[in-house]
Amino acid sequence: MVVPELRPWRAARPHVARAAGAVRPRLARAARSAGPRVARFARATAPQLTRITRPKTWQYTAGAATAGLALAAGVVTAAGPWDSTGQRTAEQDRAVALGRTGGADHGRGSRGSGTAAAGPPRPAPSAGSVLASLGGDSGPRPDGAKAAPGGAALADALGPLLEDPALGTRPGATVVDLTTGKRLYGVGAGTPLTPASTIKIATGVAALTALGPDHRLTTRTALEPDTGELVLVGGGDPTLTARADARGLASLRTLAGKTAAALKKRDVRKVTLSYDTTLYAGAEMHPIGVNENLARVTALMADEARTDDSTSGPAPRVADPAADAARTFAGLLKKHGVTASPPGPSKATNRADTLATVSSPPLSALVERMLTNSDNDLAEALARHTAAATGKRADFKGVSAAVTARLKQLGLPVRGAEFHDGSGLDRADRITAELLTALLAEAADPARPELRPVLTGLPVAGFTGTLTSRYTDGAAGLVRAKTGTLTGVNTLAGTVVTDQGRLLAFAFLSSGTTDAWAAQSALDKAATTLASCGCA
């Protein structure tokens, strides 16, 4: 079978045509054997917003070992939660907690006696780089790396798996070699299907290109002259938090303290409090209606309007997030000696003086959080910011136009794609497997370092986010992918490192499924096959 290459828009650049490192098969075997132990620990570890390391220093490295596990991600960068070795900070922390079994011996352990061992510390084994550097396409390939032979062997391996009845009647699938840019496999690749949450990959790419990785979402307070009206102006940051431990997020408590201090300098201790949500336009209610997967889409909310202590996943939400955040803010002002009236909606005028501001983490971190946790509230917020930055109305219709326009500007194959929201909760959304792998390839392009958070934010099999408890018996740490699940829809798109050290992007979309668990298992089996079949 002849498998076509990607279209010219995705042709590989000459200087990325060869890999500079490989993950050997024995490391892949070690990864599979270590999977269950790693997954058990990961399930007990609550996801956190990862730290940002040198967000302006772009480095292209890949692969490391944690707990003897090959954690490869291809072309990566110091933007996002990566250190200089290409190892994700969150994964490194987990590996250290598992017993200091990755990278190097820190000299603090023992060998069973309860005392420090005699002699110099012994380094623990680490995986070799997958793509340690980027060079030209001439010269020999690095030790252990093999060229992808074509699609026939891959079709033989994947074909029967994707014909599993659990995946419905017409799944769409594409596999692309990210080093060469060649498509290795495709079936129904250009058929628009319901993407569910894999559409967040498109949302992330569109937001990063429209706003840039260093952009922050700012919430502020403004005082109207002569009236004493204090306006809490929503900046479209759903991660704004009222919790005592802000964990690096914008803090409503900090904003209250700054605002109270500014008011006292003006000898103001009593205000009429209002709140402004006019950054967004149109209906706040998502087409799915009231749902624990998403709050009302408004420019002002605290802690995603959750009524429990959760930070991700489904949760009960308050009926009016903006009003609730404003009431919380009034209570915080009171603790600082400023009395506020019951809040009501308003709009800050151009004459209002900004008193205080708090800002979110950079967009690179927000995109990672959105993808790792499949954060629907954040996805809808980033989609609206994309619309505003593109000159479109910040509503659902504007989101559709803005995301499509951004992807077109990148030269991506958007034919048949329909974006009705940013989260993928709208069943009218459509995307192709071809477009999903093209988005991942764009994010891996060395010429687009600003898009790297789309790769670094993908959940890691057996480690993070929505893949924490999946792949416990195979491919843990080798698969990084965005999941998507709606009733009758199961999707998976991301990257995988093969046992020959190749970095592949893949997208599997299925509709008409009747057993979500069986469909999920079938998708995971297909991704695991990519990692271990030796055919790419």
Image (spheres, grey):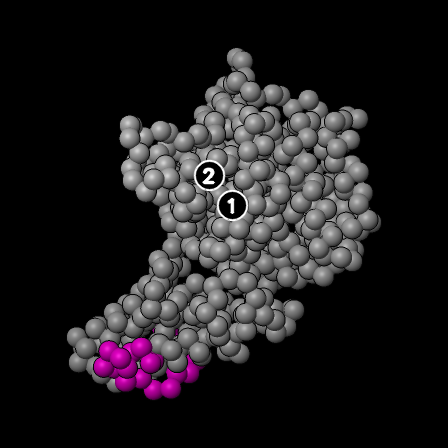
**Under tag 2, what secondary structure?**
loop
Of residues 215 and 485, the one drawn nearer to the viewer in this rendering: 485
Residue range (magenta): 330-350
Instruction: Give the mark nearest the N terminus, 2 or 1.
Output: 1
User: Residue extending furthest front?
Assistant: 113
The C terminus - image quarter: top right
Q: Residue at x 42, y 36 (%)?
A: 102
- Where is 409 relative to 221, above or below? above
Residue 202 % position (x, y): 58, 49
Tell me: 465 left or right of 492. left
* Residue that mark 2 sits on: 67
Q: Residue at x 33, y 68 (%)?
A: 244
Q: Amino acid at mark 1?
A: Val
Tell me: 345 left or right of 138. left
Residue 479 % position (x, y): 58, 40
Residue 13 % position (x, y): 54, 26
276 in magenta: no
Q: Amino acid at mark 2?
A: Ala
At label 1, counting other C-alpha atoms closer than 10 Å, the crowd grade (few under 14, some 14-19, many 20 or more) is: many
Tell me: 115 left or right of 67. left
Of residues 511 and 258, the one drawn nearer to the viewer in this rendering: 511
Q: Residue at x 19, y 77 (%)?
A: 264
**Under tag 1, what secondary structure?**
helix
- Where is 256 relative to 141, above or below? below
- Where is 283 relative to 44, above or below? below
336 in magenta: yes
In the drawing, what numbered circle is on residue 11?
none
* Residue that mark 1 sits on: 38
